[in-house]
Structure formats: structure tokens, C-alpha cells
Amino acid sequence: MKKLIIFDMDGVLFDTIPFAEEFYLKEHPGMTTKMYIEIHTGNFHEESKKHSHLQIPRTEEERAQRRINYADKKSKTPLFEGMKGLLETLHNDNYILVMNTNAYDRNCLPLLENAGIKNLFDFIASAEISKDKIEKFKLIEEKYQAEKKDILFITDALGDVRDADVAQISTVAVTWGVHNKAFFEREEHTNLIGIVNTTEELIDFIKSTTP
């Protein structure tokens, strides 16, 4: 079995968190940066519902236009430095690259295409497939008939670490996204096997822990 590497997208591959936060706070007057960061300690879609009462009332037409504008601006967000090279190296070394993201297709596919990395991923599990990452971990396991020892997940959010813990998927946390190291050290997770601070550390960690 080839090693299966599952990537989260926002905050891991792309520097989208500042833009996403700015958009979210404008849509939810009264929300703070601290509150926004805390949303990511759980299931993002479910936690967001708890703040829906703060959302600015808009017509469906207005919401549709804002979704279009958001997707267009997000699609131009750059990759983190060194990330494209990391993905290309893994792909060339015959790792199977998969994505498990909270983003909808409209907010991830153009972004991946503009960055020239969509072709590196064998499967993209977006919010269209499910808003539950635990469910998508199971789907990915079944799709590839993979054993848990052959799977590694990479994320920037404590909520994802918690989901991967339930799914019993080994996880590496990166500190350049929505959560810093302190978040990942809040509690113990048996599946959290590493915390890295740079893309160089990440590739070294993957190479040292996988066949």
C-alpha cells in the first residue's frame, strides 16, 4: 500500500485564514478574532451555526453575489512558501495525496487550479461530499482500502485534530495556520504525532515517519 497523505487546505496549503477571518467578521458584527479562532476548535460548520444570529440579514440574491465575490478573491490567495515544492516532491515519490477540507468546491477548486496543484491530488473531499470530516476520513479509508498505519493527516486546526482522533488517524499539526502550538498542547491526543513550524520540518517529518 502506498502511503496516503491527507491534507487540510486552508491554513495548511494556502494563506487564506486572514482573508477568511476578515470576511467572516464583517458578516457577523460583534464577532471577534478570538471567537473566530475558537470556532476552529470544533466542527467549523456546526460551530458557525451558533453565531448565525449575528449574521447581517441579506436577500438570497445578495448572499449569492457575496459567495461569488468571496470565491473569486479567495482563488487568488497564494500558497505558503515551499508548499508547492513539498506537494510535488510527495507526488513524485508516489505518495497518494488526498484533501479533506471544510471548503465548498467553489472555494477550493479554482484556488487549487490557479496554484497549479489540483492535478497533484487524487481525491478532493470538499463540503459538497460532507460537512463532517470524521465521515470523510471513513470514506477515504474505504475508497483506498487503506489501513490506518498507512494514513497521515496534516492540519492547522485543533478541531481537525479532535476529528482525526475519533477516526484514529495519525496527525501532524502545522503552526502557520489558524492555531498556534499552544492550541495543540491544550489537551492530549494519541493521534497527534507531531507539531511542525515550517514546510521544511513538515517534509522531513513525513519522510522520517513513512516508508
Image: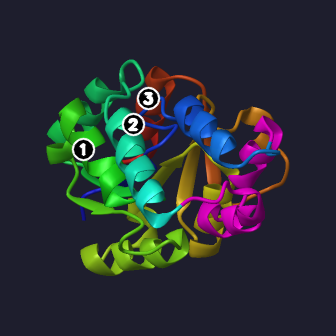
Residue at numbered disc 3: 204
Q: Is residue 7 left or right of residue 52?
A: left
Q: Is residue 76 magenta?
A: no
Q: Is residue 53 above or below residue 8?
A: below
Residue found at x 40% / y 31%: 203
Q: Is residue 38 magenta?
A: yes
Please, what secondary structure does the residue beneath circle 1 have? Answer: helix
Residue 165 figure quarter: bottom right
Q: Earlier in the sequence, mark 1 or mark 2?
A: 2
Q: Which residues are magenta?
A: 32-58
Residue found at x 27% / y 25%: 85
Looking at this view, name the residue that lies furthest to the top: 81
Q: Give the x, y percent position of residue 142.
A: 33, 81
CA distance for labels 1 and 3: 29 Å
Q: Nearer the viewer, residue 209 or 69?
A: 69
Q: Earlier in the sequence, mark 3 or mark 2?
A: 2
Residue at numbered disc 1: 110
Q: Is residue 34 above or below residue 8?
A: above
